[in-house]
Image (cartoon, helix red, strand yellow):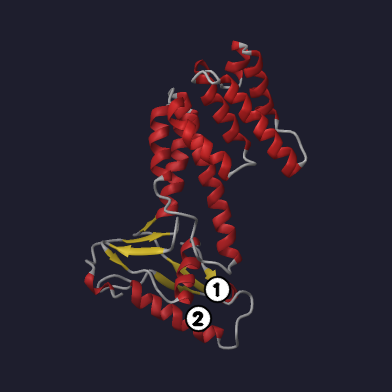
Amino acid sequence: MSLSYARPSHPLRYEVLGRLRVTCGDVDLTPAPPKIAKLLALLTIRAGETVPGDKLMAELWEQHPPRCAAASLRVYVSQLRKLLGTPGRASPIVTVSPGYILDVSQNQLDVRTFERLYESGRARYLAADYLAASECLRNALALWRGPVLDGMSGSSEIGSFAAVEEEKRLNCIELNIESALALGRHHAVIEELKGLVVQHPLREPFYRQLMAALYRVGRQGDALGVYRSARQVIREELGVEPGPPLRLTQEAILRADPARLEAVGVTASAR
């Protein structure tokens, strides 16, 4: 789609937290041809950096570029420039030896907004400002529309980027739940945590948080049942016992010792 229908004053918005999408105002400019879409994705996840042409060709053709790859890459770049260009504004794709840069300095990139909100939320959490932390972290998570660059495969660069951002997303979820627990919102997180332990059965912090939330609402037996389930899964999948934080949480709940419960963050007074 041409940008001629979009107002030049609108910044471009690049989105990779879900299926690839680029918009200008209310105009969707996402390229349909798979190779051009993949090229845009590769430039976007390295926005502001020079991506060598050889690297782009290897990723576009899955390490087996044809003889005409260099010429085809130039054609794809030209088509992408036309797609993203608009009168009165320079192309965001800049040729710099030995490759290309996607300039997003005047535009918006959802993954950078996510990371900025996540870091801000973490800082507020460490400062014990749990309400502000929760707001930042929830806003960060709201930017996700699905898996990173959903539906785009055949690229080690994209796969690596997606794995890193998915880990950040999970860390953000953990911290958001910790903020909710610190604010006494244990009832509100139980259902979410039940889903998370099914989706991520080897991620121990979710089990620990679910145990804490259940204990706070008076469901001590259910909290201990969560530990038994976690231990069974971890032993079957990894052949090891749960880590110290989970074991200490189980022991504190078993003994119902206020000092132990507070030390492992089960009781609200720990916050």
Q: Which residue is mark 2?
A: 73
Out of 229 and 89, give the one closest to the viewer: 229
Contact (Cβ within 8 Å) of mark 1 with mark 2: yes
Q: CA distance from mark 1 to mark 2?
A: 8 Å
Q: Amino acid at mark 2?
A: Leu
| Relative horizontal placement of residue 179, taking residue 155 as reference (left or right) | left
Toward the top, the furthest residue is 258
Q: Which percent across, then down, holds residue 213?
A: 51, 25
- Where, by quadrant of the figure, is residue 196 drawn? top right
Badge 1 crowding class, 10 Å Cα cut-off, few under 14, some 14 to 19, many 20 or more, is: many
The residue that appears at 55% across and 84% down in the rendered structure is 69
Q: Which percent across, then down, holds residue 254?
A: 65, 17
Q: Is residue 130 visible?
A: yes
| Relative horizontal placement of residue 270, taking residue 93 as reference (left or right) | right
Q: Which percent across, then down, holds residue 219?
A: 54, 21
Q: Earlier in the sequence, mark 1 or mark 2?
A: 1
| Relative horizontal placement of residue 138, taking residue 61 as reference (left or right) | left
Helix, strand or loop at disc 2? helix
249 versus 135 height, above or below: above
Q: Amino acid at mark 1?
A: Leu
Q: Which residue is mark 1?
A: 56
Out of 56 and 217, give the one closest to the viewer: 217
81 versus 159 height, above or below: below
